[in-house]
Image (tube, rainbow, N blue to C red):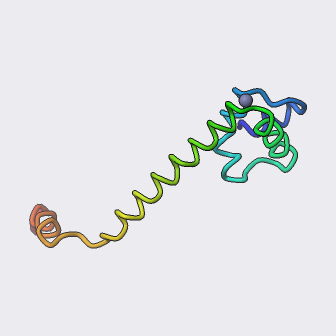
Amino acid sequence: MVAAILRDIGARVTCAEFVAAIESYLARELTAETAAEADTHRRSCGACAGYLRRYEATIDAARSAFEDEELETELPDELAEAILSRRPKR
Ligand SMILES: [Zn+2]
């Protein structure tokens, strides 16, 4: 796990490590210590701060697209019938 790797390193988080851990970071899955180190890196590194912003924006966009799709939870009748008619008859 990335979080475990970061924990082992202990001291400084590099850009590569920050990017690798970004998912766990956003999911709040890092230990408090590792999250604090990631925060420190983000504050001191414009590239990673920008990357984090774009990453979050992408997730938000994906999430809202998914929510829109969930509005249609029922199968259209024609599709349901097509699926049912393909089932082997006994
Ligand atoms: Zn960085």
Residue beneath the point at 11% across and 61% down: 86
Indicate the quadrant where residue 12 lies: top right
> Where is the C terminus found, in terms of image quarters?
bottom left
Q: Residue at x 72, y 53 (%)?
A: 28
Which is more toward the observer, 44 or 89?
44
Q: How many marks?
A: 0
- In x, y percent, where is residue 74? 27, 73
- Of 68 and 34, nearer the camera is 68
At 9% from the left edge and 66% from the top edge, which residue is drawn?
85
The residue positioned 85% from the left and 50% from the top of the image is: 32
Where does the image place residue 44, in percent across and percent down from the top left?
Answer: 80, 34
Using residue 77 as the reference point, say whether residue 47 is left or right of it.
Answer: right
Work out whether residue 89 or residue 59 is closer to the camera in this orientation and state it.
Answer: 59
Quarter of image, res 53: top right
Asked if residue 32 is positioned above or below residue 13 in the image, the reply reads below
Task: Judge left or right: residue 55 versus residue 49.
Answer: left
Assign ligand 1 to one image quadrant.
top right
* Spot occupied by residue 54 in the image (x, y as percentages of width and height): 56, 41
* Residue situated furthest right in the rendering: 11
Name the quadrant of the N terminus: top right
Task: Work out whether 82 lies above or below 55.
Answer: below
